[in-house]
Image (cartoon, rainbow, N blue to C red):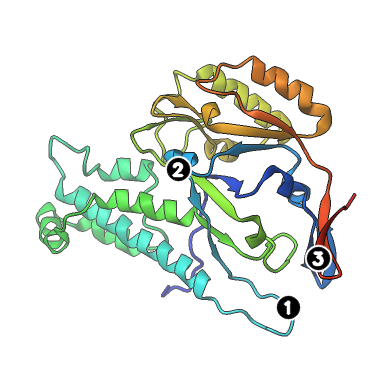
Amino acid sequence: MRAKLPHDTIIQSRACFTVAEARELSQVYELISDNEKQQVAHVDLFGEFAIGLDPIEARLLGILPTVYYYKQDIGGPSGRTAGLGWQIVERLDEARNVFSILSYLESWSNKGAQDDSIYPPAERLREMGVLIRQQPEIERELAKLKTKDAELILRLFDTDRVPAWNLVDFIEMLLSLYQTVDSTIADAPLAFFRQKEWRLIHHMTEHLAWFGLGQHKSYRNPLARTYSGAIHELRQFIQTSRNDPSDWYLNHCWVLVSSDRKHFRDFVREIVVPEHYVKRAKALIDSLPFAGSAPVITPLARKWRVVFGDGEPVIEAAD
């Protein structure tokens, strides 16, 4: 950017999954961090509890594979890593800003119209989080723009497309799918790529029912009143488990309820818990109604690894 300012913070709203069998959660592999080798398993990084969805059926919810990229320098003989992936993220962020400006042009051209649902006024765009980041001079120029001038400019963009604010939303969805291949926590090469991650990002297609746990500036919350009891309970649970999280954190939490009248729990095929939680998990499942078969409760496997003896793979305990 001309002013050499950093790009705006990209806030990702997503739930993360991994493509794996239940037994693979306990498989130990070698992780190199700061030139030191560690033996870790998926459960060491993400906990001992898991819910399993069918990877094909879950597509009805909009679950998508993560887009991996690399941005940081990793020590070793390779030296400085190329930054193509990081540049793609930056260009997407810049495209988001361009479409934000176009959103305000559309709003200006529609000023005074009775129907502002397609092209919302500037005040509502700001409430939705469609902002022109780090370009105050453009905001000042837009404020001077006449409706007639905005209409003339938009003739150059009169293509068969959705409104620009909707394009901003979709770019933010794309940005929510990006993940670095290398661990940003332990500075370990390929540590995140090993997780084979899929994500359920926040989106609002017609067949989904969802509610938020707070008041996000971009997302409206039409079912908040219907699920007020659940929102209260979940906020209390999160506040207890995360040691009183900020309102910012809660405002970025949302809950997927159902898809085409099929409750989210009916997508769950398997629940993995430590051995001493199996009875409690079964009791919970027995207390809930399911449209089809209830999910299977699977005790978490002991840690194991694959070793090679005489060239043949052999499984051994890794506890």
Residue 105, percent from left and from top: 21, 55
Q: How far separated are the C-alphas under marks 1 and 3? A: 33 Å
The residue drawn where x is 43% and y is 62% is 93
Residue 141, percent from left and from top: 25, 61
Disc 2 secondary structure class: helix
Residue picked out by circle 2: 59
- Is residue 124 or residue 256 the one in the foreground? 256
The amino acid sitting under disc 2 is Arg
Disc 1 secondary structure class: loop
Q: Are marks 1 and 3 in contact (CB under 8 Å)?
A: no
Q: Are marks 1 and 2 in contact (CB under 8 Å)?
A: no
Q: Is residue 26 left or right of residue 160?
A: right
Disc 3 secondary structure class: strand
Residue 189, percent from left and from top: 70, 69
The residue drawn where x is 76% and y is 21% is 280
Given this view, does label 3 or label 2 mark the residue nearer the observer? 3
Say whether disc 1 or disc 2 marks the residue closer to the N-terminus: 2
Q: Are marks 3 and 2 in contact (CB under 8 Å)?
A: no
Q: How far separated are the C-alphas under marks 1 and 2? A: 38 Å
Residue picked out by circle 1: 75
Residue 317, percent from left and from top: 88, 51
Mark 1 residue crowding within 10 angstroms, few (<14) / some (14–19) / many (20+): some
The amino acid sitting under disc 3 is Glu
Q: Is residue 194 above or below residue 11?
A: below
Total numbered circles: 3
The amino acid sitting under disc 1 is Gly
Could you say which quadrant of the image residue 286 lies in?
A: top right
